[in-house]
Amino acid sequence: MSAFAVPSPADLGAAVLARLDELASITDEPGKITRLYLSKSHRRAVTLVESWMRDAGMSVRLDPLATLIGTYPGSNPDAPHLLLGSHIDSVRDAGRYDGTLGVVSAIEIVRQLNAAGQRLPFGLTVLAFGDEEGVRFPSTLTGSAAVAGRFNPKILDEKGEDGITRRMALAEFGCPEGDPAAPWQGQSGLGYLELHIEQGPVLEAENRPVGLVTAIQGVTRGSCRIVGLAGHAGTVPMAMRRDALSAAAEMVLAVERIGRETAGLVATIGQLRVPGASVNTIPGAVEFSLDFRSEIDAVRKEAEARIRQAIEAVAAARKVEANLAYTYEAPASECDPGLRLTMAEAAESVVQKPIRLLPSGAGHDAMSFRGKLPFMMLFVRSKAGISHSPDEFTSEADLGIATATLFRAVLDLAKKHD
């Protein structure tokens, strides 16, 4: 591999931002960014990203689950590949950086290498996944799961709110038939790198442009239904009430307390419903959701037991019935220590100071590679930590620093494999 200088962060930031802006114009809702998986706007986004990949010197194909795969061979065509990428689908009324940054920055790296006639001792594969957000169908991360060899054929029969199955939507989208569980393209992978906005406030609070992800937090989700006794607000004495909402309120605070006092744990009650509620009725039933996460599975598992105990204690004291069910679980996914070291060295060479380590509280495509392929994530600063919103923002300068860091890490890996 001949000497190659990483372009300036300013040049990289300008190139990346221009493409983010262009991709943001593709939406199914004028005035908003709404690009759901397998929608018409997703199809247009695939066409645009495919043109960028081809212009950057890659061969391109669409896989059976609508993952767009761009391939840039190494100096030895049979060499294994390093995977780079993220997703191009969005939530409704989204921002322009979430997911798309990881795809656009990877394309820019390949474009720069190709323009200089530079080949690495390994190939580069850029992946533009389309099902990270999980808005349209019940399952999510299906594209990255298939690339990692974790495809579940049952997802093809899942239906969205429109009654259309994933199988039907894939056919209408124009995806080729075939086995999406096949290896990403029959070659061994060296690892997977994903650049993503932080979606949180830590880096901004500490005035840091980038941070290294230690692990993607494991998550437990569930729901709880509290059954008390409905009654007239004016006729039932306070001491005789079995108020489901008051019990639920105490449980919510108990969950929050456990989250606050447990290092490395976050706990959230995001939904609360009072069926049949009225202003002059003591609530007889309440339902609420549960979501708690940690990068250490043992901490999360201990929290499962403590939360259950706390809810049961409140229910007993208030003479209500509590039906708690944990309905979803995903283990923590640790980033590869070797890739983390390479990324840390790259980041420090660009930023010129020690780099912050932090967990990812949100799920990402990278977690699909847990136990299958070494992976690493790089975070870039988000204004106020806002994401999944039109107010999502990362500065052009930070985009350039993050892309330069990712570029530097790719070249450092190339030196180690030369």
Image (cartoon, grey):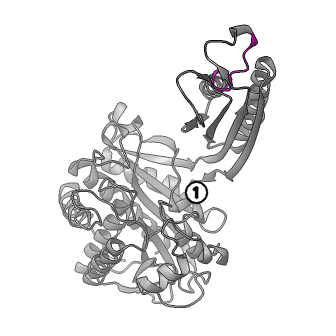
**Residue 64: image location, x then y, percent:** 51, 84
Q: Specify whether residue 359 is in view.
A: yes
**Residue 249: image location, x then y, percent:** 62, 23
Q: Kindly state the secondary structure of the residue where label 1 is placed.
A: loop
**Residue 198: image location, x then y, percent:** 41, 46
Q: Is residue 189 depicted above or below 352 in this figure?
A: below
Q: Between residue 101 and residue 71, name the one nearer to us.
A: 101
Q: Main secondary structure of the magenta part?
A: helix
Q: Is residue 244 magenta?
A: yes
Q: Around disc 1, counting alpha carbons within 10 Å, would you say few (fewer than 14), some (14 to 19), or many (20 or more)?
A: some
Q: Between residue 160 and residue 35, name the one nearer to us.
A: 160
Q: Is residue 222 left or right of residue 42?
A: right
Q: Residue at x 56, y 57 (%)?
A: 338
**Residue 210: image location, x then y, percent:** 37, 46
Residue 227 location, quadrant: top right
Q: Is residue 324 depicted above or below 90 in this figure?
A: above
The residue range painted magenta reads: 240-248
Q: Is residue 176 depicted above or below 199 in this figure?
A: below
Q: Residue at x 29, y 84 (%)?
A: 54
Q: Residue at x 58, y 82 (%)?
A: 180
- The amino acid sitting under disc 1 is Asp
Q: Residue at x 47, y 63 (%)?
A: 193
Q: Between residue 126 and residue 20, name the one nearer to us.
A: 20
Residue picked out by circle 1? 336
Q: Specify whether residue 206 is in view.
A: no
Q: Between residue 270 and residue 71, name the one nearer to us.
A: 270
Q: Is residue 180 depicted above or below 199 in this figure?
A: below
Q: Is residue 10 magenta?
A: no
| Quadrant placement of the N terminus | bottom left
Q: Is residue 265 left or right of residue 396?
A: right
